Image: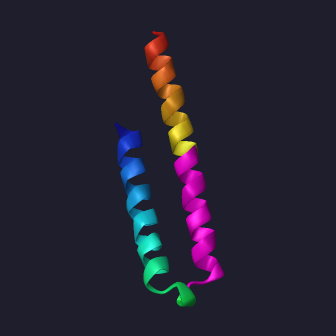
């Protein structure tokens, strides 16, 4: 499923950013935070779309 691949990519990106924050919290920038927020919003959108697709499939 395409949503699974997108989810995996976003999860990997968030994990990478999380490691950066953990390792060098004093070196993180506002841009890093903005990127994390953007990825979280994409993840939320992806999960909402997946939910709609599953609900539509179940309703058939």
Residue drawn at (43%, 83%), measured in percent from left and top? Answer: 23
49 on left or right of 6: right
Relative horizontal placement of residue 17, taking residue 26 as reference (left or right): left
Does residue 59 sit above or below 39 in this rendering? above
Name the residue: 56% across, 52% down.
42
Q: Residue furthest top?
A: 60
Q: Does the magenta portion include 2?
A: no
Q: Residue 25 at what x, y percent from top left? A: 53, 84
Dividing the picture into quarters, in which one does residue 9 lie? bottom left
Question: Seen in the image, is 2 located left or right of residue 40?
Answer: left
Q: Which residues are magenta?
A: 28-44
Report the magenta stretch's main SS: helix
Quadrant for the C terminus, please.
Answer: top left
Q: Residue at x 46, y 71 (%)?
A: 18
Residue 32 image-quadrant placement: bottom right
The outermost residue toward the bottom is 27
Picture mark count:
0
| Residue 29 left/right relative to 51 | right
Q: How is the image coloured?
A: rainbow
* Above or below, comparing residue 10 to residue 58 in the picture: below
* Image position, residue 4 (x, y; %): 37, 43
Q: Nearer the viewer, residue 24 or 13?
A: 24
Judge whether residue 40 is colored magenta. yes
Which quarter of the rendered picture does the N terminus lie within? Answer: top left
Where residue 20 appears, as percent x and y from the top left, is: 45, 79
Q: Position of residue 12 (x, y in %)?
A: 38, 62
């Amino acid at each position: 499923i395409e949503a699974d691949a997108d989810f995996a990519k976003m999860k990997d990106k968030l994990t990478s950013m999380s490691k950066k924050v953990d390792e060098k919290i004093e070196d993180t920038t506002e841009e890093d935070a903005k990127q994390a927020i953007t990825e979280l919003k994409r993840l939320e959108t992806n999960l909402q779309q997946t939910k709609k697709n599953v609900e539509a499939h179940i309703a058939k």
